[in-house]
């Protein structure tokens, strides 16, 4: 066996430039597959992280007649519920620096970042003291801050929030990142968000009920089962809640994950074609090697080399080319992903199982495309091979 690999290595070095070019073509194909596999995983991880940050990990509960504080307490007591937060959403106008801006006035509770995942940039979020004291404070998103003041940090500035049924003079105590909240993505037609204590908003507008309750489920909870449980306990609570509606936000996550998987599969197929094309390079090189080594094959057979020995030598040569190409391609692909993720600020993800499969696939393709040249070399007759002039 050592002699087989020695012969394959000698043949590799004999035409080293041609061998290097063949290895490079295989490496490019393998690198493309590696990049596509890793990009798919990085994309899926980024989507999952973003959806997790946006709060798509639970349910939205609403009612035609509104939801009371008693409904909120009932939902919070369920073992399937990790967090539950009341939401009072009303379209309004924010008056700043003498101009009115269309905004979404969102009445929230303390700890809202745990449910709708607000990303704080400056100042602070709303506290329990703000909620219990109906404090005249608010948190705005950075888009509104930049539009009005040309900068992010506007903590300490004042605004007037104008509802249809009342107005409130508020002090800005915090600024959040634009797009960090699920609510901002849902209400995309009104890009500016102003978050106020729900108690303050209810006191200003006179509303005594919540528009909806955002629910984050405990880990491992099936959203459909939690949805059925919430419907059942609220219908038995005796509250006059009218028509109850629940929306499974986790299903949106599944749909987006399926879309990412489909795109990754399509891109992988494209990468597989490039790898297949590089296999023809092995076929061409190995056929050329058979023609160049015809007399050598004849001499080996004349001194006793068996058909299996010749076959093994050429298959080893094909395997050597694909092995170097696979190693180089995966190294280039993983290195490219690591550098790209570092520059763009994403988390690099390397799917070891899929990369191992790509590595083995490259070796199998190399053997498959080298099989015919090896079979042809092993089938040469010694007398005809010795007469070959090349």
Image: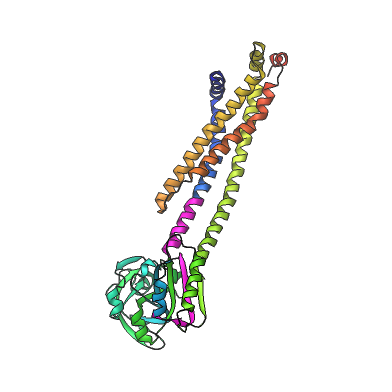
From the viewer's perspective, tell me whether residue 370 is left or right of residue 12: right
**Residue 295 locus on image (x, y percent):** 66, 16
Q: Name above or below for residue 299 compared with residue 192.
A: above
Residue range in magenta is: 40-69
From the viewer's perspective, tell me whether residue 64 is left or right of residue 163: right
From the viewer's perspective, tell me whether residue 227 is left or right of residue 380: left
**Residue 376 locus on image (x, y percent):** 69, 25
Residue lying furthest top:
303
Residue 364 sits inside the magenta stretch: no
Looking at the image, which residue is at 33% across and 84% down?
168
The answer to whether one can see residue 27 in this image is yes
Looking at the image, which residue is at 70% across and 14% down?
382
> How many numbered badges does the structure rendering display?
0
Residue 48 sits inside the magenta stretch: yes
Looking at the image, which residue is at 55% across and 18% down?
3
Q: Quadrant of the C terminus?
A: top right
Foreground: 349 or 110? Answer: 110
Looking at the image, which residue is at 48% across and 40% down?
332
Foreground: 330 or 55? Answer: 55
From the viewer's perspective, tell me whether residue 302 is left or right of residue 27: right
- Colour scheme in the image? rainbow
Q: Name above or below for residue 326 compared with residue 115.
A: above
**Residue 355 locus on image (x, y percent):** 51, 42
**Residue 241 locus on image (x, y percent):** 47, 82
The answer to whether one can see residue 102 in this image is no
Q: Quadrant of the N terminus?
A: top right
């Amino acid at each position: 066996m050592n002699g087989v690999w020695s012969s394959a290595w000698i043949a590799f070095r004999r035409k080293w430039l041609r061998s290097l070019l063949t290895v490079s073509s295989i490496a490019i194909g393998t690198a493309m597959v590696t990049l596509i596999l890793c990009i798919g995983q990085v994309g899926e991880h980024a989507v999952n992280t973003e959806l997790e940050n946006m709060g798509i990990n639970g349910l939205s509960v609403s009612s035609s007649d509104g939801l009371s504080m008693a409904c909120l307490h009932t939902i919070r007591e369920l073992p399937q519920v990790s967090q539950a937060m009341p939401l009072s959403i009303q379209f309004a106008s924010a008056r700043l620096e003498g101009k009115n801006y269309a905004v979404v006035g969102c009445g929230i509770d303390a700890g809202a970042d745990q449910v709708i995942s607000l990303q704080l940039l400056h100042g602070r979020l709303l506290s329990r003291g703000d909620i219990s004291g109906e404090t005249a404070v608010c948190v705005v998103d950075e888009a509104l801050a930049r539009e009005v003041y040309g900068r992010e940090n506007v903590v300490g500035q004042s605004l007037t929030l104008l509802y249809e049924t009342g107005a409130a003079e508020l002090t800005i105590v915090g600024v959040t990142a634009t797009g960090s909240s699920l609510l901002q993505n849902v209400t995309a037609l009104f890009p500016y968000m102003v978050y106020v204590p729900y108690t303050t908003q209810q006191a200003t507008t006179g509303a005594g009920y919540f528009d909806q309750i955002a629910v984050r489920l405990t880990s491992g909870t099936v959203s459909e089962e939690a949805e059925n449980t919430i419907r059942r306990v609220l219908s038995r609570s005796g509250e006059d809640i009218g028509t109850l509606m629940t929306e499974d936000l986790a299903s949106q996550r599944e749909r987006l994950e399926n879309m990412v998987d489909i795109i990754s599969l399509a891109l992988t197929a494209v990468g597989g074609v490039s790898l297949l094309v590089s296999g023809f390079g092995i076929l061409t090189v190995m056929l050329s090697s058979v023609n160049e080594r015809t007399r050598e094959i004849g001499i080996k057979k004349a001194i006793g080399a068996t058909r299996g020995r010749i076959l093994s030598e050429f298959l080893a040569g094909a395997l050597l080319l694909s092995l170097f190409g696979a190693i180089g391609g995966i190294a280039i692909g993983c290195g490219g992903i690591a550098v790209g993720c570092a520059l763009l600020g994403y988390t690099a993800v390397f799917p070891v199982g899929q990369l191992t499969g790509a590595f083995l696939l490259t070796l199998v393709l190399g053997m498959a495309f080298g099989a015919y040249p090896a079979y042809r070399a092993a089938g040469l007759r010694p007398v005809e091979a010795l007469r070959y002039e090349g």
